[in-house]
Structures are given as C-alpha cells and as structure tokens.
Amino acid sequence: MMQTFKKVIEASYLTAEKAWSYRAILRYFYIQHERMREFLFPEEILAHLKGSSDFKDYTEEQLHQDLEQLVRWNNLLARQEMGRAHTIEEFKKKRFRYQCTPYTVEFERMLSEMEKGGDVFGGSLEKKEFERLYQTLVDMEKALQQPALPQADDCSQLWNDIFTYFRSITKNTSDYIAHINSEQAEERMHTEAFLVFKDQFTSYLRDFIVGLQHTAQKIQQLLRSIDMEKLRPFIQQVIVHQQHVPRFEEVTDDTALMEDMEGKWQTLTVWFLGDAYRESELDSLQTRTNEQIRRITRVVQRLGERHHYFRSRKKDYLHLANWFASMENVDEAHELSAVAFGVLHTRHLFSDHIPSEDIYTDTWQEQPIKHETNPRIRNYREKTKAGAIINQREAKETVRKQYLQEKLAEQNTIEKYIEGNTITIENLPIIETNVRKMLLSWIGKAMAKQDRTFKTEHGRVVKVHLTPERRVPLRAEDGTMEMPAVTFEFLDEVSNHGA
C-alpha cells in the first residue's frame, strides 16, 4: 500500500517556484507529442520560447538548467546525440535530445482539458449515449449466443466500445448534475434573464428523462439476461487480443486481467441495476433530474411572483376608476365591484373534522359537518367532568365485521367478472362504481412495478398487460371512459391449476 501511494515527484513542476518556465517547456513537449514528434533539441525549444514576450530575456543557460531539473523530476528523458559534430564547440560539449515521459503527457492532457472547461463543470445529458451503449450490448449478446465466439479482435472492439460509452455516460451525467447544482448556476437561476432560458432548459431535461426511460429499461433487461458464466469466454477472447499486443513492460497474468474485467462488468451492472446495499445510479439519476425540473418550476414561480409584486398597477386602477365613474346607478357599480373585488361578505369556514377515511368518497356523499364556535374570551375553559372508561369491544367487533363483509362482497363482485384467470376491460359489461375504482387502482399499482405484477388486498397476485396503442371503453354505472386496452391476469390461478 505504501508503495502504491508513493510521492509523485513528476508533479513537482506544477507548484515549483519556476513553474512559469517549466510548464511552458513541457506544454511545448506535449503539443509536439500529440503531433507524433517524440525527440526535441534544446535549440528548437529555445526558439519556441523566444517567440513569446515573456521569455525575451530567457537565455540558453537557463534553458539547460531547467531541462536538467525536469530530467531529475522524471518529466523528461535525456538521450545523448551521437551524430558527427560539425564544430569544435559541438565536439567539446555533449548534445542531448529530450523526450517527455508518460506522466508528463497525462498531466498536460488533463490540464489542457481543464483549461478549456474553465472553473465550472461541463458535461451533458445525452440520451444518444444510452442508445449507443444498448446497441453495443445487443451486439455482444448476439455474439454470446453464437456457437463459436467471434475473433479476438472483434470481441476486444466490442468490449472497448461498451466501456467507452459507459465512461462517457458516467462522466457527462455526473458533471452536468454538478454543474446545475453549482453556486454559479444557482445565482443565474434567480435572475430575470433565466425566464427566457427556462423553457429550453426544462424541455432539455424532460426530453432526456423520456429517452432515458425508454432505453434504460431495455439495457436493464439485457444486463439481467447476461450472467458471468456466459461472459467469461468472451472476456477470455478480449484478454487473448490484449496479450497479442507487443509491449516491452512486464505482461500482466491472465488471472489479474480476468479479475479486472469482471470488476468493470460488475460496476456497469451495479450502475444500471443496483445491488443489495444501494439503489442503482440510474434510478438516482432519474430522481435527481426530476428534482431539477421541480426546482426550476419553483424558481420560475418565485420570479413571477416577485415580478408581479413590484409591477405598478397605477394604470389598472385608473382604468377601473374611469369604469366606475361611467356607471349610471349604484347597482351597476355594486355588480362591477363584485366582479372586480369579489363578494365583500364572503366567509371561509374550516373544520378539522374528518367524516370518512375513504379517499374515493365524493363530496356530496358526505354528511354535513357540525362546527361549534367557542367564545373568544381569555378565561374561557371547556367544562370537564370525570368519566368512566367505556368498553368499546362490541362496537369494534361490529365495525370489523362490517369491514370484512364489505371486502367479501367486493371479492365476490370481482369473481363474477373473471373469465378463466383473466379480466379483459373490453369484454366487461356495465360494472359497479367501486369495481371501476378498484380496477383503476390496480393499474396504478402495476405501473409502479417494473414487471407490472402486484398483490391485491385479498392476497392474489395479478399481472397487468397493457396495450397503449389500442383504445377501449370502460363502462360503469357512473359513466364511460376511454382507456388503453388492459388485461388482468391472476397468476395464482395459473399456479393453482398447474398444481
């Protein structure tokens, strides 16, 4: 462990006192490395630095000192030039050419990307990335189903594509969520200029959610169908391809490579499916995106209220005053006042009495509520008297029996609409109101489940089959509604028949 987290001496040039010259030299090395020029001579480096006004007093001796220091920090590798010397000076002193090390390349690549992004998070919510990942996973599943796996290079390409898209998804989504939760974004959301941008922003988030829900479910189903036993031969082909790539460093053994790739696949599945300890990052992403939509809605509402509060209504009042002045009699003025300001003697009454626990009870089915007004005096106290504890067992038993009878009647009513082990909406006659409410509540419970299966209050397992493209009428005593074609399948009936 101590060897793994050793001091990174290659990063010393970033915080050294002469970082201004070290970074300029190594940035030039990085640019030339990207252009596939590996070895540079001091003369070329000095000519490049002299092209900047910051290095007009920079000497060749200073350059050699900086290059020697960067070699000591392992940022550069020095190789002596053994070619034929053309002058006595070249013969007397050693000539070196320099090459930047892998650490330096990665440092400068990272710094270049950070300089482009500035001091804010970037990222984006791209549903196309999920579609590309799904398509690549489909290609891999087809390869797994073939009698013989594809060539090692094809397997390696598929594997690299999957994790390229996955890394892009995780990086872009996390960066964008951090961006819209940052302090800069929070400040901009509370400005009037955000009102112009809010429709585009909300539409962007909503469009991502819709596309994500459509593609993510297919990715989840596909990941559940691929187990590690079927995947190991595919991973072995990927390892074979990697082992064929000539490398001068020590080759990692197959066992370590297999563990590493299995760990990557486990990370991918946990991100989409979750595990026993936490929910999936996909669900978390959907939740946080929906929260952002609600947050934007609240911000826009507050901005609208603030804008309305500070808006002058002088012209409105003048127009209303002229309107009142044009009235011929006071009765017409009273009518205009009632429309403009409301009825002046209206009183709003509130009672905390709850007549029924049934959420489906309509207002006109409830009994009137009696409200007793207490005197508004400081010393008022309600009269109390000592009383005995009354045994409510009989009343409780009566209520319990009534509840069970209602549930039994409800169950018997449902039973008469079951054909075989299903209830089909379009085949139903005119049904009772409480049956309609129950069937709609079943649909709501099923839509909250991924497999569209739930358990009723009577302990029966029901699976809902929904056909959105076909519309059918649901006829009930309180009216007819049009809805997608739905079939309720009682799975416990199937198991009972099978037994």
Image (cartoon, rainbow, N blue to C red):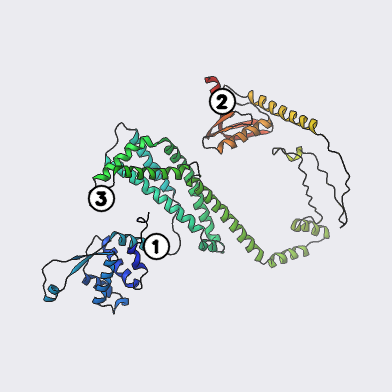
Q: Which mark is residue 114?
A: 1
Q: Secondary structure at mark 1?
A: helix
Can residue 62 be seen? Answer: yes
Q: Position of residue 410 (x, y in %)?
A: 68, 28
In the rendered view, would you say 60 is above or below 9? below
- Disc 1 vs disc 2: Cβ atoms closer than 8 Å? no
Q: Is residue 403 above or below residue 216?
A: above
Q: Is residue 28 visible?
A: no
User: Which residue bears the numbered disc 2?
Assistant: 492
> Is 52 displayed left or right of 379 in the figure?
left
In the picture, the disc for residue 250 is 3
Question: Considering depth in this image, is 392 or 492 the residue closer to the camera?
Answer: 392
Instruction: Looking at the image, tell me whether mark 1 or mark 3 is earlier in sequence order.
Output: 1
Using residue 342 as the reference point, say whether residue 64 is left or right of it.
Answer: left
Find numbered disc 3 in the image and state the secondary structure of the residue it sits on. Answer: loop
Please name which of the two marks, 2 or 3, marks the residue nearer to the observer: 3
Give 207 or 447, whichever is nearer the viewer: 447
Are dots 2 and 3 in contact, CB under 8 Å? no
Q: Place residue 475 in its image quadrant.
A: top right
Helix, strand or loop at label 2? It is: helix
The amino acid beneath tag 2 is Asp
Is 237 left or right of 199, judged from the image as shown? Answer: left
Position of residue 201 relative to residue 358, above or below, is below
Residue 452 is left or right of residue 219, and the answer is right
Residue at image coords 83%, 60%? 330
Dot 3 amino acid type: Glu
Task: Say which of marks 1 and 3 sits in front.
Answer: 3
**x 43%, y 42%: residue:** 269
The single residue placed furthest to the front in the displayed view is 2
**Tag 1 and tag 3, C-beta contact below 8 Å:** no
